[in-house]
Image (tube, helix red, strand yellow):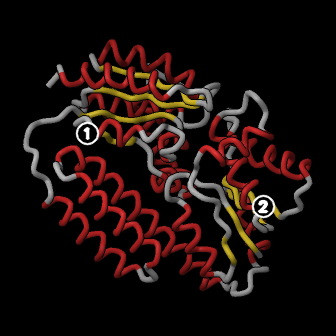
């Protein structure tokens, strides 16, 4: 079995770890780039969002390289993400590819297990150890990345900090035991903290919106790097590990849903699909924490985030916090985006 799955940030590292533990050959496309995007654009519906087009490009590339099994997360509710797997399957088979499609979602766990039993080294103990190690890697990667973007604006020698971060990511990718993983992460946090040499107070921005465009840097034009290079501390509201925990762990899902419904009452009283309610919940949370600005990123035509955008205007007025909206698709002009960001940075700097 030759397995592939699309890129979204560094989630490929824990997923590769899980499937290689079970004896599968993992075929990965290169990190998202213009060639991958163009491959997806060739076959995607015109009005599909940029996440769909990039995911399609990822899978097309891997199938051409010999992959025979595609793994995709599934979903439900009023968001087109729930249809991604179905549409990808139809498009790819219409092109002429023959492959096995595995849709990962809570309701299909038993079906997925049945298909994974065909892997050469499958056993329930290996599956459990693989998932545990993959989960720890995902948590470690997200914790490192969160700390990195919070600290990098306060570090003068940014290249040295980036080299340290890249070394940590490579270690996580090849690490095969949880103890070593946790020890390395602790040492990395200490080393990065010791590099902090800018003491002045910097503006803080919460970056929220659609989970794919938040966690896949190519889709948002590497916006975290752009802002941090200009002295803005960026905090991403959703990481893949928190999304997995809040969607696949029943007690965690119930707790966060109740907390969100309580917090957003009066702003959004019903779920609108996708990460729509999470966007409003995080906007209120970070505004109350004293953040200086909110950066709302979404794919063009994303219905849940279009609804959230209207509510964010109310939050901006009531909480006296600057909000910038960025919609992304394949037609975005980099120069125009940077011009808007420069103006946003100027507004934030005047608040300090």
* Residue drawn at the location 39% of the way across and 20% of the way down: 340
* Residue drawn at the location 30% of the way across and 74% of the way down: 184
Q: Name the disc covering residue 63, or none.
A: 2
| Gap between marks 2 and 1 measured at Cα | 39 Å
Residue 55 x %, y %: 67, 48
What residue is shown with label 1?
233
* Residue drawn at the location 61% of the way across and 34% of the way down: 273
Judged left or right of residue 50, residue 131 is left
User: Which of disc 1 and disc 2 is earlier in sequence?
Assistant: 2
Locate the C terminus and report the quarter of the image it occupies. top left
Badge 2 local density, few (<14 within 10 Å), some, or many (20+)?
A: many
Q: Is residue 220 above or below residue 294?
A: below
Residue 66 x %, y %: 78, 68
Q: Is residue 270 visible?
A: no
Q: Which type of secondary structure does the marked residue at label 2 adopt?
A: helix
Locate the N terminus and report the quarter of the image it occupies. bottom right
Question: Between tags 2 and 1, which lies in front?
Answer: 2
Judged left or right of residue 80, residue 98 is right
Q: Is residue 154 above or below residue 166?
A: above
Judged left or right of residue 118, residue 268 is left
Q: Can residue 280 be seen in this view?
A: yes
Q: In this view, does 261 lie above or below 111?
A: above
Residue 10 x %, y %: 49, 58
Q: Which type of secondary structure does the marked residue at label 1 adopt?
A: strand
* Residue drawn at the location 71% of the way across and 69% of the way down: 3
In this view of the protein, which residue sits in the foreground, 98 or 133?
Answer: 98
Residue 198 x %, y %: 10, 45
In this view of the protein, which residue sits in the foreground, 144 or 66?
Answer: 66
Badge 1 local density, few (<14 within 10 Å), some, or many (20+)?
A: many
Q: Name the disc covering residue 32, or none.
A: none
Judged left or right of residue 179, residue 161 is left
**Quadrant of the image occupied by residue 31:** bottom right
């Amino acid at each position: 079995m030759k397995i592939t799955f699309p890129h979204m940030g560094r989630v490929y590292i824990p997923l590769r770890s899980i499937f290689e533990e079970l004896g599968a050959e993992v075929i990965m496309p290169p990190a998202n780039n213009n060639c991958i995007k163009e491959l997806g654009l060739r076959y995607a519906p015109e009005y599909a969002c940029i996440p769909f087009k990039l995911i399609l490009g990822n899978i097309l590339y891997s199938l051409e390289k010999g992959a025979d099994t595609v793994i995709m997360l599934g979903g439900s509710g009023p968001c087109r993400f729930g249809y991604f797997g179905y549409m990808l399957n139809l498009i790819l088979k219409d092109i002429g590819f023959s492959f096995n499609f595995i849709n990962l979602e809570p309701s299909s766990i038993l079906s997925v297990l049945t298909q994974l039993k065909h892997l050469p080294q499958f056993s329930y103990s290996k599956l459990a150890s693989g998932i545990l190690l993959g989960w720890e890697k995902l948590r470690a990667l997200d914790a490192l990345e969160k700390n990195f973007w919070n600290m990098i604006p306060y570090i003068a020698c940014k290249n040295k900090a980036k080299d340290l971060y890249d070394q940590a990511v490579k270690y996580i990718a090849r690490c095969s035991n949880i103890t070593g993983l946790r020890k390395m992460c602790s040492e990395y946090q200490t080393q990065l903290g010791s590099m902090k040499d800018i003491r002045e107070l910097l503006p803080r921005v919460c970056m929220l919106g659609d989970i794919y465009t938040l966690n896949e840097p190519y889709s948002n034009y590497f916006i975290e790097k752009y802002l941090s290079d200009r002295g803005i501390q960026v905090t991403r509201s959703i990481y893949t590990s928190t999304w997995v925990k809040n969607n696949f762990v029943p007690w965690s899902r119930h707790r966060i849903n109740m907390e969100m419904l309580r917090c957003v009452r009066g702003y959004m009283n019903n779920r609108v699909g996708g990460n729509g309610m999470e966007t409003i919940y995080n906007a209120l949370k970070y505004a109350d924490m004293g953040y200086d600005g909110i950066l709302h990123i979404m794919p063009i035509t994303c219905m849940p985030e279009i609804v959230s955008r209207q509510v964010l205007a109310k939050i901006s007025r009531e909480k006296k916090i600057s909000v910038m909206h960025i919609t992304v698709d394949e037609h975005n002009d980099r120069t125009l985006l940077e011009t808007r960001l420069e103006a946003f940075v100027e507004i934030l700097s005047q608040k300090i």
